[in-house]
Amino acid sequence: MIIDGKAIAEDMYKALAKRRALFERDVRLGILVVSPSPVIESFVRIKTRAAARLNIEMVRVDLSEGVDTSAAIEEVKRLAEETDSVVVQLPLPKSLDTNAVLAAIPPEKDVDALNPTIPEDKHPVFAPVALAIVEILERSKVVIKGARTVVVGAGRLVGAPSAVLLTRLGAKVTMFTLQKGSVEDLKDADIVVCGAGNPGFIKPEHIKKGVAIVDAGASESKGRVVGDADPACAEKASVLTPVPGGVGPVAVAMIFRNLFDLIELKN
C-alpha cells in the first residue's frame, strides 16, 4: 500500500475548516524566517497556502543571515505577543543558537512542540511530524500497541518526538542512529519510522515482508527530494509512504490541528 499523503491531508482540511468556523475571530500564525533558501521558501509556501485555505493570517518576519541570536529571540517574543502560535522555520543559520531561539516560544504557542526546555511528554501538543506518522499508521490499520518499532534517526523534528509518541501508544520502540543500533535491527521490525535524511539507504534486504515503513527522512539527491527508504522496499512492505507526497502534507495539516488545539486549551 503506497500511502497518498495528499489525500489524507485533504480529508483533514475538511475537518479543520469546520473547526475554524467555530472561532468567531481572526486567527493568526506567526512564522520567523532567517536567511531563506529555495528549500526553506518551498516549505513556507506550503504552510502559507494551507493557512490561506483555512482563513488564517500568516504573519511572516524575515531576518537576514547576519542577525544575532538576541535579535532573533526578540522577534520570536514579539510574534508570540501578536499571534496565536509561532513557527520558527528550521534550519536556522549556524551562527544562531537554535535552542535559545526555540526556547523563546511560549509552550502555549509552540505549534511545532520544539521548545527544548519543555520535555517531549510535557508539551501541550506533539510534534506535527510525529502526529502525522501516527495518523498514517492508524488510517492504514497498522496496530501500534505491541509492535516492534525501529525509529531511524533521533533528530528534533522526526526521530525524538516520534519515539516518545509511539512509546506512549504502546509500541516497543528502539532507536537506530549512527551512534546506536544497527541496520540489522530493521529485519525484525513491524514498523520502521525513517528520519535520518540518508537517501535510499534502507534496502529491501534490510526489512521483513509485511513491514510498515513511514518515511519522513526527506533529503536532496541528484536534484530530487528522496526518502531514507529505497522505493524498491515497496516490494516487501505492507505500507510505504513516498517522498515527497507521503508524510509531508499530513504534517503540515497537523500544524493547523495543533494551532486549533492550543487556542482551545487557552480558552
Image (cartoon, rainbow, N blue to C red):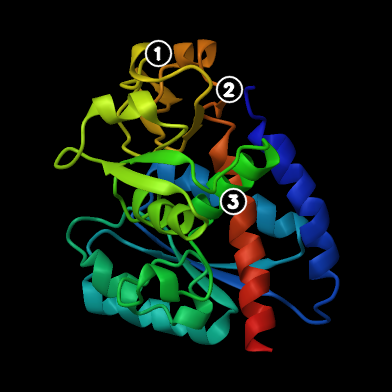
Q: Amino acid at mark 2?
A: Ser
Where does the image place residue 94, in percent across and percent down from the top left?
19, 56
Asked if the residues shown at circle 1 and circle 3 are in contact, with their CB atoms under 8 angstroms apart, the answer is no
CA gap, disc 1 and disc 3: 29 Å
State whether residue 153 is above or below residue 267.
Answer: above
Distance from label 1 to label 2 (Cα)? Answer: 12 Å
- Dot 2 falls on a residue whose secondary structure is loop
Query: Closest to the observer: 216 or 256?
Result: 216
In front: mark 2 or mark 3?
Answer: 2
**Whole-percent x, y for residue 255 in the image:** 58, 60
* Front in this rendered view, residue 120 or 266: 120
Tell me, yes or no, if residue 199 can be seen here: yes
Label whose residue precedes the other's in the sequence (2 or 3): 2
> What's the amino acid at mark 3?
Val
Q: Please tell me the numbered disc located at residue 252.
A: 3
Q: Please identify the quarter of the rendering in which residue 115 is found.
A: bottom left
How far is disc 2 from disc 3 in space, using C-alphas? 24 Å
Above or below, 76 relative to 194: below
